[in-house]
Amino acid sequence: NMDFASLRAEINAERPVIILQNLAFNVYPIWHYSVVTGIAPNNDSFLLHSGRHKYYRSSWTTLDNTWSRGKYWALVVVPAGEIPSSIDDKNAIRAALDLEQLGKYRAAQLTYAAILERWPENFTAQVGLANTHMMLEEPLAASQAYKQALRLRTHSADVLNNFAYSAFKLGCEITALEAASCAIRIDGANHKELGETLDELKSLASTTSNHSLCPKIRCYDQSLAANDTSQN
């Protein structure tokens, strides 16, 4: 749902907004979609594309009456990598997750990156960014994004578990096994799959080695410090 302040913000950002109106009564509704495209120069009405009418003027009161009957439903369509001015971080995350579920990993990745531009400390977006890099076979970028997520939440066994896979993809078996072991130390008692990750990586490792560009970690009982001297 959207309020008038948010509607104005989107219009001022030159983003048309699709709204749902009830042009009749709640007991006998006539549902109608309109596109709000602008605000009249005198600021007393909105400009709508409504049915066959372009730039139809609707007063603030009329729009409020008809839009409120539609519970202020609104839709803003933006290109991948942009997020509406009026959206909060929770709804932005929901949109990115929807893209992931549709298999639109690059679009989801761009959305997570846009979220992080506006909310740099958003842990969920940082993890989502890393996960999309993994889905797109970009383990180096994934590793860097997981490390940033671990700076935001050092006790996340799930992120450590995913970081282990990204390190393994980079040919960093030692780092991968250390990260998987660290995840178990943090929360292995509650998550059986963490032990399964370690067993899987051990079985897949043809050697147990690192190269000079491998990320390094130090694991404590309840914390992790990521070494920032590599893969930044």
Image (tube, rainbow, N blue to C red):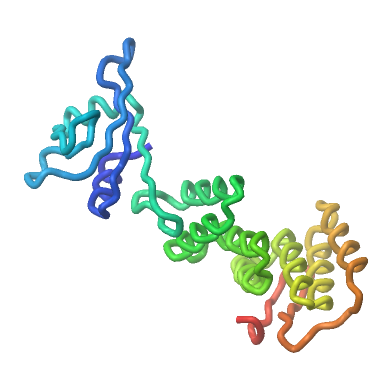
- Please indicate, yes or no, whether residue 203 appears anywhere in the rendered image: yes
Image coordinates for residue 20, horizontal then vertical, percent:
33, 30
Front one among 104 and 166: 104
Image coordinates for residue 112, horizontal then vertical, percent:
52, 59
Among all residues in the image, which is located at the extreme front?
52
Taking the spot 70% from the left edge, 62% from the top edge, the residue there is: 159
Q: Residue 195 is drawn in which quadrant?
A: bottom right
Name the quadrant of the N terminus.
top left
Taking the spot 22% from the left edge, 36% from the top edge, the residue there is: 49
Among all residues in the image, which is located at the extreme top?
27
Image coordinates for residue 106, horizontal then vertical, percent:
55, 59
Horizontally, is 59 left or right of 148 in the view? left
Q: Residue 173 is drawn in which quadrant?
A: bottom right
Name the quadrant of the C terminus.
bottom right
Q: How many marks?
A: 0
- Please indicate, yes or no, whether residue 222 appears anywhere in the rendered image: no
Among all residues in the image, which is located at the extreme bottom?
212
Among all residues in the image, which is located at the extreme left?
42
